[in-house]
Image (cartoon, helix red, strand yellow):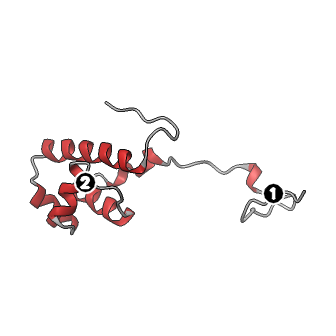
Amino acid sequence: MMIFTNRSKTTAEVLATLGERFRDYRMRMKMTRKDVAEAAGVGLTTLFRFETGKMSDMSMDTMVRLLRALDMADNWDQLLPYLPESPYLYNDKMKKIQRIRHPKK
């Protein structure tokens, strides 16, 4: 099992690890590559390259489609959990801040 540390892996390395994990999930669900590719609306070559670590870049759209094909799209909360409202996101007039500005020097 690979554990990621902050900035320790390149995008290609992260995709390779995710591809390996995706393949394990797909196989445990007894789905063929063809089944997943058709359900996700992606090409077999794309799926093969993802699972074998030969993909250096992937769109979010493709990733979401693949996760939906395995019925795993609801796992995004684990990646970016919901944050409760913070009082630091409001100005003195209790208006929500739209962006962060650094003070001028």
On the image, which quarter does residue 66 sit in?
A: bottom left
Report, in whole angstroms, how far the alpha carbon at label 1 lies from the one at label 2: 40 Å
In-image side of 43 versus 97 (left or right)? left
Q: Going 26% across and 42% down the picture, which residue do you hit?
A: 21
Q: Amino acid at mark 1?
A: His
**Which residue does the numbered mark 1 point to in the structure image?**
102
In-image side of 20 versus 92 (left or right)? left
Q: Going 22% across and 56% down the picture, which residue do you hit?
A: 49
Q: Nearer the viewer, mark 1 or mark 2?
A: 2
On the image, which quarter does residue 33 sit in?
A: bottom left
Other-residue count near label 1 (Cα within 10 Å), few / some / many at <14 / 14–19 / ≥20: few
Query: Which residue in the rendered view is the most extreme toward the right?
Result: 105
**Which residue does the numbered mark 2 point to in the structure image?**
50
In-image side of 80 versus 20 (left or right)? right
Q: Position of residue 46 (x, y in %)?
A: 22, 62
Q: Amino acid at mark 2?
A: Phe
Q: Going 9% across and 47% down the picture, which residue do you hit?
A: 30
Assign a secondary structure to mark 1. loop
Front-lying residue, 38 or 10: 10
Q: Quadrant of the C terminus?
A: bottom right
On the image, which quarter does residue 78 sit in?
A: top left
Front-lying residue, 95 or 18: 18
Mark toward the start of the polypeptide (1 vs 2) = 2
Query: Which residue in the rendered view is the most extreme toward the top?
Result: 1
Q: Quadrant of the N terminus?
A: top left
Front-lying residue, 74 or 55: 55
